[in-house]
Amino acid sequence: MNDKPATLNVPDSLRYWQSEAGSFHAVVGAVDAALKTDVTDADRWRKLAHVRFVTTMLQRFLDRLFAAEECDHLAELDRHPEWRHRVNELRSEHAALRSGLTQAMSQLDRACAANVAACDDAFDKLCQLIKAIQQHMHRETELVQDCFDQDYGGESG
């Protein structure tokens, strides 16, 4: 019986991450652009509607991405004892980020364009959540790279 875990096909995982990273950055860029748009009080409702729309895209993207990772990518990495702790941390972050995004959507839905303070508060909290999501994605990418470095002794090219 061989006790050594199966080697992850890291080049496939890195290609997956490269593909997903482009989509992730595009969706986050859309949310970021919507949040940074300066508007007059009369047009605040347009900004709020646009932020809601692109945040819904982000929520759908992350739901799909996290589900795929949990069933495939992270499940495969979890078979390696030396990475299990990091995998479990990332999985628990998925739940927290999903919850945070649901709360942000609820706050956006409750915000009224006429209430500048409520809109600005919702926008600020969404900006903080976007930063947390970006940090999470960076840690996941680092984990895949570490796996590649350990299994193959180098960087992908």
Image (cartoon, rainbow, N blue to C red):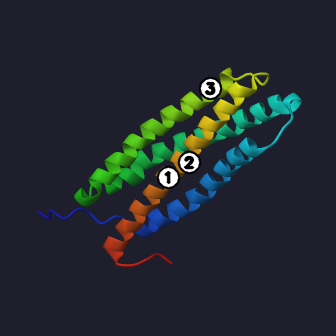
Q: Earlier in the sequence, mark 3 or mark 1?
A: 3
Q: How far, Cα to Cα, is label 3 from label 1? A: 22 Å
Residue in the image at 55% along x and 28% along y: 103
Q: Is residue 100 left or right of residue 24?
A: left
The image position of residue 34, as x and y in percent, is 74, 43
Q: Are marks 3 and 1 in contact (CB under 8 Å)?
A: no
Q: Is residue 6 left or right of residue 73?
A: left
Q: Relative to 52, does residue 5 appear above or below in the rendering?
A: below
Judging depth in this view, the residue of 121 and 90 nearest the camera is 121
Amino acid type, mark 2:
Lys
Q: Is residue 31 left or right of residue 136?
A: right
Residue 107 disc label: 3
Amino acid type, mark 1:
Gln
Judging depth in this view, the residue of 10 and 97 nearest the camera is 97
Amino acid type, mark 3:
Gln
- Using the rendered view, name the quadrant where residue 117 is placed: top right
Residue in the image at 34% along x and 78% along y: 153
Q: Is residue 22 left or right of residue 10?
A: right
Give neighbour class at mark 2: few <14, some 14-19, many 20+ (Cα, 10 Å): few
Residue receiving disc 1: 135
The image position of residue 150, as x and y in percent, is 32, 72
Q: How far, Cα to Cα, is label 2 from label 1? A: 6 Å
Judging depth in this view, the residue of 99 and 113 nearest the camera is 113
The image position of residue 98, as x and y in percent, is 50, 36
Residue receiving disc 2: 131
Q: Relative to 11, does residue 97 appear above or below in the rendering?
A: above
Q: Are marks 2 and 1 in contact (CB under 8 Å)?
A: yes
Residue in the image at 63% along x and 55% along y: 25
Q: Give the secondary structure at mark 3.
A: helix
Residue 77 disc label: none
Give neighbour class at mark 1: few <14, some 14-19, many 20+ (Cα, 10 Å): few
Q: Give the secondary structure at mark 1.
A: helix
